[in-house]
């Protein structure tokens, strides 16, 4: 998803949200991508998958913070903690 969203520089929060939505739709409508994700999750195991999802969440929150001066509801600390 990250490579789809950040293919080119993002200029606004609205553009970021639109790209995330479009990327999610592309992934949802491409069965091979979901198959690759499932295979990767099995290979990595639960802990690594959770860390990867957590890392992506923090990256998205940090991007929102930089773009609009705020972040996702309920997200107060933009530092990644493992």
Image (tube, rainbow, N blue to C red):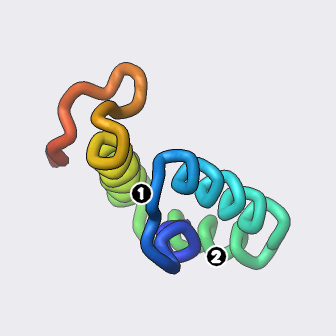
Q: Is residue 28 left or right of residue 13?
A: right
Residue 62 to residue 19: above or below: above
Snapshot quadrant of residue 23:
bottom right
Query: What percent of the width, then of the height, locates residue 11?
Result: 45, 61
Q: Which mark is residue 36?
A: 2
Q: Is residue 50 visible?
A: no
- For label 1, the crowd category at 10 Å Cα-Cα, with few meaning under 14, some 14 to 19 and many 20 or more, is some
Q: Residue at x 34, y 51 (%)?
A: 63
Query: What percent of the width, then of the height, locates residue 82?
Result: 16, 48
- For label 2, the crowd category at 10 Å Cα-Cα, with few meaning under 14, some 14 to 19 and many 20 or more, is few
Of the numbered discs 2 and 1, the one sitting upstream in the chain is 2
Q: Residue at x 64, y 53 (%)?
A: 18
- Most distant residue in the top direction: 74
Q: Is residue 4 left or right of residue 29?
A: left
Q: Residue at x 39, y 50 (%)?
A: 60
Q: Is residue 22 left or right of residue 82?
A: right
């Amino acid at each position: 998803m990250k490579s789809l969203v950040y293919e080119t520089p993002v200029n606004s929060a609205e553009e970021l949200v639109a790209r995330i939505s479009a990327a999610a739709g592309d992934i949802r409508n491409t069965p091979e991508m979901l198959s690759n994700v499932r295979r990767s999750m099995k290979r990595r195991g639960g802990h690594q998958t959770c860390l990867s999802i957590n890392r992506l969440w923090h990256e998205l929150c940090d991007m929102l913070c930089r773009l609009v001066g705020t972040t996702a509801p309920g997200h107060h600390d933009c530092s990644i903690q493992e």
